[in-house]
Amino acid sequence: MRFAVFVPLVLLTGLAWAADVTLPDYERVELDNGTVLLLSEKHEVPLIGMRAMIRGGSVADPEGKEGLAELLATVMQKGAGGRDAVEFATATASVGGRLSVSANVESIAVSAEFLSRDAELMIELVADLLQRPTLSEDEFAKERDRAIGLIRAARDADPSALMRHYTNAFLFGDHPYGNPTIGSESSLETLEQDDLQQYYEDRFGGDRLIISVVGDFDLAAMKARLTQVFGEWGAAPAPLPDIAVPAAEPGPRVLLVDKPGATQTYFWFGDVGVSIGYPRRAELDIANRVFGGTFTSMLMTELRVNTGLTYSARSVLEQRTQPGAATIRSFTETDKTAEAIDLAISVLRQLRDDGLEDDRIASARALILGQFPTRLETASSLANMFAFLEQYGLTRSYIDGYGSTLEAAAAESIALTIGEVYPDPESLVFVLIGDADAIRDDVAKYGPVTEISITEPGFTAPQPD
């Protein structure tokens, strides 16, 4: 991942700008069937952004059929409402629109951006995708085989693309957050078109739907049209998954994924972190920027600039309805594996023991405040934000008060946040992909080692008979 470097003028001028950032007014309407509409007029440019979100996602994948939600999102784009894949894509492209479907851990979402003159076409296409997807047998088989091929290619050529799935499976175990969103070769091979159709019929419905629309339109007319199109859509038959708080299994422990002959070791380590509702969000954002969120972070300075052990090192916090993974991520030459991991752990220990100096806090605060407004400039970005807030039950204060909370964040509260969120260096969960024969003995010092082959068709270690 590359990080942008901003000149001081941008940071300084952004400081006051971001402190005053507030969301525009929007109307929230809950229809009789449970569909939630979030509508905001923005007339500066003749564009409309829409985000239509179905609650659910990969957490609703049936056991043994992981990857179903992501495959459904892909196949949905291959025809709907009487249009085949080419006709559907042409209808969007012919007016310069943008439309896509994506799946993540807790939702399946349609994103659209069209000229305001084409609002009716946008609504028609989004409604077709959600309510009348073709889900053809041929497109299903093609996309399933493609998904399997991409996983196999990653095992051979770019295993770093699979690190997230190995880590989540090892860290979360049987919890839904441990499911690989992309599935695995073995789970995808069991899927049939009927599974896709059943997931859709069970999990899609008006009671799961959030529609956020921002842009150049008349609010009353848009509300009436969306109510007409989606207001009679029935409820999804299957209940939403109940996502429990994941239990953090005590470390240290190590998963070693053997890729014989690998010249590099990819490594992640960490533990279960915090949820999206963590109260000291500003303090956490500052801490993560300083620790591993920019090119000048503590991790990058030590692992790349000072020692040349890696090209990239970062810390990532995955926050969802329940706590996600809090991980440190990097890679290095095979014979430098233990040296790089030891150094990364020492930087983590330094963060937890010493906290952050005032000048680092001030620099990170300025960077965040300077970048923050640009995330809310367009109709589409605002539509996405409104839908995000609704999905997670967050109020507009999540945005409106953010600049003030950043400015108020002090070293003491940041230190408290670091101690709560970042894992204990003595109780870490490690996942490594590399040449096991070359690094097995070196990494045994980090904890009991579970070893699997990169060729295993899944992301978990086989259970003993």
Image (spheres, grey):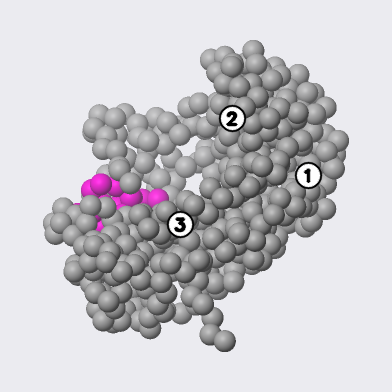
Question: Label 3 to label 2, Cα distance in Å?
Answer: 28 Å
Q: Sequence order check: which comes first, mark 3 or mark 1?
A: 3
Instruction: Name the residue at 43% across, 32% down.
Output: 373
SS state under label 2: strand
Disc 2 residue crowd, few under 14, some 14–19, many 20+, Cα 10 Å:
some
Alpha-carbon distance for marks 2 and 1? Answer: 20 Å
Which residues are drawn in magenta?
284-302
Q: Earlier in the sequence, mark 2 or mark 1?
A: 2
Judge whether 138 appears above or below 257 on screen: above
- Residue drawn at point x = 37 percent, y = 35 percent: 371
The reply to whether residue 203 is visible in this rendering is no
Q: Nearer the viewer, residue 372 or 299?
A: 299
- SS type, badge 3: helix
Residue appearing at x 29%, y 30% in the figure: 10
Residue bearing mark 2: 99
Residue 119 at x, y percent in the picture: 67, 19
| Label 3 – label 1 distance at C-alpha | 34 Å
Q: Is residue 207 above or below residue 325?
A: above
> Which residue in the protein does label 1 denote?
205
Residue that label 3 marks: 152
Q: Nearer the viewer, mark 3 or mark 1?
A: 3
Q: Residue at x 26, y 52 (%)?
A: 312
Query: Of tags 2 and 1, which is closer to the observer?
Result: 2
Give, as a three-letter code, the residue at label 3.
Answer: Arg
Query: Which of the two residues, 178 or 147, is positioned nearer the viewer here?
Result: 147
Q: Quick one: 349 or 193, which is closer to the camera?
A: 193
Would you place residue 138 above or below residue 69 in this image? above
Front position among marks 3 and 2: 3
